[in-house]
Amino acid sequence: MANTQTSVPAFTAGQVLTAAQMTEVNTGIPVFADTTARDAAFGGTGEKTLAEGQFAYIEATNTTQYYDGSTWQTVGQTPGLKYITGASFSAVASVSFANNTFTSSYQNYKIFFVVTSVSATCSTYGRLRASGSDNTTSNYFYGGFNRSYNNTDLYVNATATTFWDMGRIESAQGNYGGFMIDLVNPQVAQKTQAYGSCVSQTASPFYWGTINQGFNFNSTTQFDAMTIYTTTGNMTGTYRVYGYSES
């Protein structure tokens, strides 16, 4: 982008400024692609030291932030859900959120993933991502309580797998499915957890129901995104990601 910066220079007395440096000054509030670029722009050689009162504009979230002396805050932000990203997808086998969907700007996230049709009966699985790659280690655990019109079942996946099971979709029975989860601390170097519910279907015998679920990633890895994929065929639908604002 035209105004994006990678550093915030600290000029010295008598220094001759280049045209590029003057352009940076004329933008007013420094502009960064994301919070990672923002954090890297202060405190290095020839850069300003981050201090209370500093402003920054973040292109990834279209927000203006200020530093209060200990953390970055968003101008005009009030507690509650703040929209981060979302998209529609059509006839795909997997959907990956953009890099840096999860950042230090928010501690916890709410995700809505809605499937409106599938090409074949399938399960939807989830994996966490870091720096553009899915984490496929055997650290995923999950369990839940299923309730349908003709069945009640408590299940726990006690063996580590390489994915979270987000729910089953039966192609012959309406094609509809999806889930809603709260993702806890994906950007912190500690175990990542999630809680939520999904719409799930089976065919033999057929039932439609909801599952209240819990998920755990049993390793202290920092994540910035997530991938949802099908076990077979492809899917069509939408997703939305929100951050829980605390101030």
Image: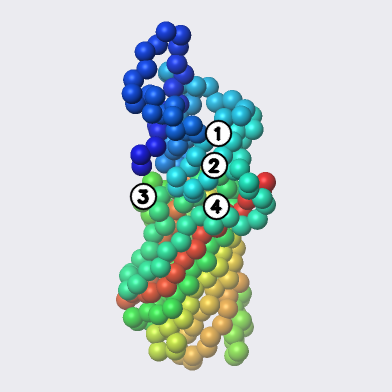
Instruction: Between label 3 and label 2, give the one nearer the viewer.
Output: 2
**Which class describes the residues within 10 Å of circle 4: few (<14), some (14-19), or many (20+)?**
many
For residue 55, the mark is 1
Residue at image mark 2: 64
Q: Is residue 130 left or right of residue 247?
A: left
Q: Are marks 2 and 1 in contact (CB under 8 Å)?
A: yes
Q: CA distance from mark 4 to mark 3?
A: 18 Å
Query: Dot 1 lies on which element?
Result: strand
For residue 160, the mark is none
Residue at image mark 4: 192
Q: CA distance from mark 3 to mark 1?
A: 28 Å
Instruction: Between label 1 and label 4, give the one nearer the viewer.
Output: 1
Amino acid type of the residue tagged 1 in the rendering: Phe
Amino acid type of the residue tagged 2 in the rendering: Thr
Query: Dot 4 lies on which element?
Result: strand
Residue at (40, 89) in percent of width and height: 172
Instruction: Between label 2 and label 4, give the one nearer the viewer.
Output: 2
Q: CA distance from mark 2 to mark 4?
A: 28 Å
Vertical placement of residue 92 versus 25, above or below: below
Amino acid type of the residue tagged 4 in the rendering: Thr
**First in sequence: mark 3 or mark 1?**
1
